[in-house]
Image: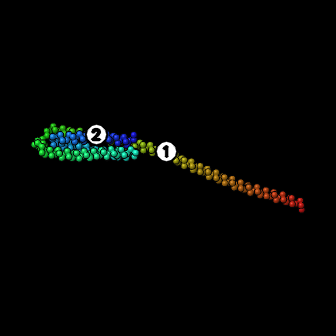
Amino acid sequence: MSSGTELFNNYDSDFQLVYSEINQKLEELPEQGGQQQRKTTVKAVERAIDEAYEILDQMSVEVQNIASSERGQFNARLREYRSNVDRAKQNLKSAAEQADRQALFGSAAERDGGQTSDDIALDQRQQLLSGTASLDRSSQRLRDSQRVANETEGIGANILADLRGQREQITNSRNTLMEADSYVDKSIRTLRGMARRMATNRIITVAIITILIILIFLVIASKFW
């Protein structure tokens, strides 16, 4: 499994947690009686939706690091996830509007924001816990990204080392080739010198043979004179 696929799956797990939290709070929203509590839940869902979009953006980046032959199925999952979050955002808007209507036309206690300090403290505690969980997930994603960056840096360093080794091999090969070329040039000059000497020797040999033949004819001719 490539690092891009591994990190994508980690983000997928984070998304499932956040999306589950969104659905859970959306289900709880209509059942909450206090106006302040509903506002707290709405804000928590909005933060979770923003976090979900952030995770999807990071997943979109990681898809580019996945092999093109496998990229299609991951893009399909991304489109499905983004569609689900868009639908959850619309559901939140509808649920918030309905909660506002209930708060407006509900009981006098609700219209007056009738909520005890314990309820407010509980809402704030839930909001703090939700924010802490979101921060933990973001920190984990940052650690995963840092780990992948370190792995990528290590791979890059190894590639650079290999390239340096290959460059040295190429340089050595070029030097060897240049040296071989010099030997070839010397060999060519030597062969040319030998060829010239052979041609000279051939001319001298032909001249000697010619002179000998002439002398023989002269000797033969002298006997008849």
Residue placed at 12% from the left, 45% from the top? 105
Amino acid type, mark 2: Leu
Specify the label residue 17 is tagged with. 2
Q: Quadrant of residue 225?
A: bottom right
Q: Quadrant of the N terminus?
A: top left
Counting residues from the start of the chain, the first of labels 1 and 2 encountered is: 2
Residue placed at 10% from the left, 43% from the top? 108
Expressed as whole percent of the image width and height from the top left, the position of residue 63 reads 36, 45
Asked if residue 218 lies left or right of residue 128, the reply is: right
Asked if residue 195 lies left or right of residue 135, the reply is: right
SS state under label 1? helix
Asked if residue 156 lies left or right of residue 10, the reply is: right
Expressed as whole percent of the image width and height from the top left, the position of residue 22 reads 24, 42
Residue annotated with mark 1: 165
Vertical side of 217 occupied by 45: above or below:
above
Residue placed at 42% from the left, 43% from the top? 155
Amino acid type, mark 1: Gly
Do the CB atoms of the residues marked 1 and 2 lie less than 8 Å apart?
no
Q: Quadrant of residue 81?
A: top left
Return the residue nearer the eye: 21 or 206.
21
Expressed as whole percent of the image width and height from the top left, the position of residue 173 reads 54, 47
Expressed as whole percent of the image width and height from the top left, the position of residue 192 reads 66, 54
Mark 1 vs mark 2: give the one in front: 2
The single residue placed furthest to the bottom in the displayed view is 225
